[in-house]
Amino acid sequence: MEYEQTISDAVRVVEAVGAAIMVVGGLAALVAFVPRALRADEMDRPYEELRRNLGRAILLGLEVLIVADIVRTIIVDPTLESVAVLGGIVVIRIMLSFSLEVEMDGMWPWRRWQLAGGTRAEQRD
């Protein structure tokens, strides 16, 4: 088996893992949502938890898919066209990730740090 074929097969596995993370994570979020929704007096909290958990599953799956795209472009098909396509894919996925994070948290990422009252370095200590 050739080196490129081995890498291509590995990329397919990573893509399958990324898709599985989104599917299994989404199903797990739905399974966790049902009992909470049935017990809750209000639907606001279970619904928000469902959205947050679905968003986390999608974000993690997108990150894994980006890894697969990078490996494919760098090792399997290192042409200028494939690098341009990779750049477009990464920009789209970054925008999706950013908008999902804003949707889950309900605020811009920089507002979170301002509301916490300090810089990121201070928050890590």
Image: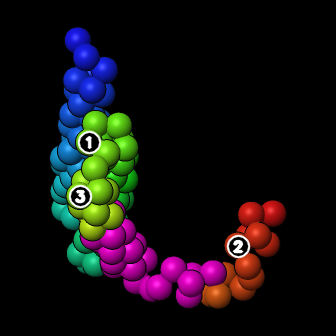
Crowding at dot 3, Cα within 10 Å, few <14 / some 14-19 / many 20+, comes out as few
- Amino acid beneath label 3: Glu
- Amino acid beneath label 1: Asp
- Residue 35 percent coordinates (x, y): 22, 54
> Circle 2 — which element?
helix
Q: Taking the image as drawn, is residue 114 in sight?
A: yes
Provide the residue designation for mark 1. Answer: 77
Provide the residue designation for mark 3. Answer: 81
Of the numbered discs 1 and 2, the one sitting upstream in the chain is: 1
> Circle 1 — which element?
loop
Q: Report the disc number at residue 120.
A: 2
Q: Report the disc number at residue 52.
A: none
Viewer-closest of 43 and 109? 109
The stretch drawn in magenta includes residue 7: no
- Residue 86 percent coordinates (x, y): 29, 58
**Mark 1 vs mark 2, CA separation in Å:** 38 Å
Of the numbered discs 3 and 2, the one sitting upstream in the chain is: 3
Q: Taking the image as drawn, is residue 36 in sight?
A: no
